[in-house]
């Protein structure tokens, strides 16, 4: 499939705006009115994209089409879906979204979540145009995460040089569009980011996430080679506008000029 088959080339857009932050909204935690308000705020702040993501979800087909439509009506930056697959259904998709991440969970004990879900999704036609542009990603979890293990059999990756290098080499070898580093309770270390950036091909994007709440964390990850720093919980508080301003104060972030493609 060529990028031209989709409404916009989100991968090219992300490659053109490296060195930034992206906010995650959980549609199964945040009501749609609040999501629209936050979408407008991050758009005005110059963020290059928005993630709609959740580890757990129910009634996706009932809830998500209207949710995505409301969010997309509030912004002109790409809206990207990031949800785990379900056996027999593949990755859930809303056709009106701009893009959908299709992660291979490299640390999972279950081959369905490593690679079979990708084949199932394509076999079912979930990722075919005019569906959102698929972004193939390698997803790795660091630190204990019982929730992800019970849901997808994901074991944490150790952050020693040998283990991280082996994972980075695997991600490069299979040619993923991006690598998504995540820690629910711990931290992805800047050194882990450095190793991945040293090993990955130049065109492969590197995302770092997990507990990001301060401009110092943003600067540390960007300085270590992450292309994007992902944050969610920082804006799940009553003073979320002030929290967004703090995140945006990171010294390594660009100004608000954004070229939409």
Image: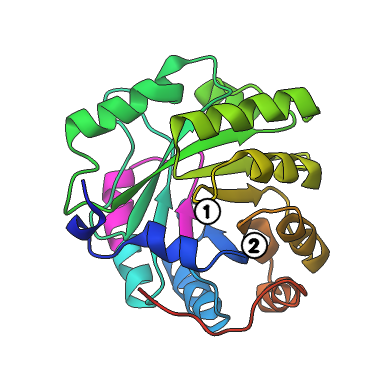
Q: Which quadrant: the N terminus?
A: top left
Q: Position of residue 191 (x, y in %)?
A: 80, 42
First in sequence, mark 2 or 1: give its number.
Answer: 1
Q: Is there a contact, CB below 8 Å, between mark 2 and mark 1?
A: yes
Indicate the secondary structure of the residue bearing disc 1. loop
Cα separation between marks 2 and 1:
9 Å
Q: Residues within 10 Å of mark 2 (few under 14, many from 20)?
A: few
Disc 2: which residue: 236
Which residue shows up at 54% across the image and 85% down it? 257
Residue 24: image quadrant is bottom right
Residue 250 visible to an observer of this rendering: yes
Residue 119 got which mark?
none
Q: Position of residue 81 (x, y in %)?
A: 40, 52
The residue lying toward the viewer, choosing from 78 and 8, is 8
The residue lying toward the viewer, choosing from 132 and 40, is 132
Q: Which quadrant: the C terminus?
A: bottom left
Indicate the secondary structure of the residue bearing disc 2. loop
Disc 1: which residue: 29
Q: Position of residue 122 (x, y in %)?
A: 23, 33
Q: Residues within 10 Å of mark 1 (few under 14, many from 20)?
A: few
Which residue shows up at 28% across the image and 65% down it? 8
Count of marks placed on residues:
2
Q: Which residues are magenta?
A: 49-66
The verdict on residue 189 being magenta is: no
Position of 166 compared to 60: left or right?
Answer: right
The residue lying toward the viewer, choosing from 83 and 135, is 135
Position above or below: 152 against 256: above
Residue 23: image quadrant is bottom right
Position above or below: 177 against 172: below
């Amino acid at each position: 499939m060529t990028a031209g088959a989709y409404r916009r080339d989100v991968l090219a857009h992300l490659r053109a705006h490296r060195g930034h932050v992206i906010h995650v909204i959980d549609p199964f935690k945040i009501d749609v009115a609040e999501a629209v308000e936050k979408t407008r705020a991050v758009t005005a702040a110059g963020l290059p994209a928005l993630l709609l993501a959740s580890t757990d979800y129910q009634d996706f087909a009932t809830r998500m089409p209207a949710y995505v439509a409301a969010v997309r009506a509030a912004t002109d930056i790409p809206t990207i879906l990031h949800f785990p697959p379900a056996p027999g259904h593949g990755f859930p998709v809303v056709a009106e979204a701009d893009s959908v991440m299709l992660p291979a969970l490299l640390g999972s004990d279950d081959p369905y979540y490593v690679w079979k879900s990708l084949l199932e999704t394509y076999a079912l036609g979930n990722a075919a145009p005019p569906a959102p542009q698929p972004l193939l990603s390698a997803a790795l979890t660091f630190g204990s995460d019982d929730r992800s293990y019970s849901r997808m059999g994901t074991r944490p990756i150790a952050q020693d040089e040998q283990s991280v290098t082996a994972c980075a080499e695997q991600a490069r070898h299979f040619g993923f569009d991006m690598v998504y580093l995540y820690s629910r309770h711990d931290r992805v270390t800047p050194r882990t980011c450095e190793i991945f950036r040293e090993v990955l091909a130049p065109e492969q994007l590197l995302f770092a996430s997990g507990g990001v709440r301060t401009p110092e964390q943003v600067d540390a990850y960007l300085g270590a080679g992450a292309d994007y720093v992902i944050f969610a919980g920082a804006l799940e508080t009553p003073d979320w506008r002030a929290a967004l301003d703090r995140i945006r104060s990171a010294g390594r972030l660009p100004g608000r000029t954004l070229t939409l493609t």
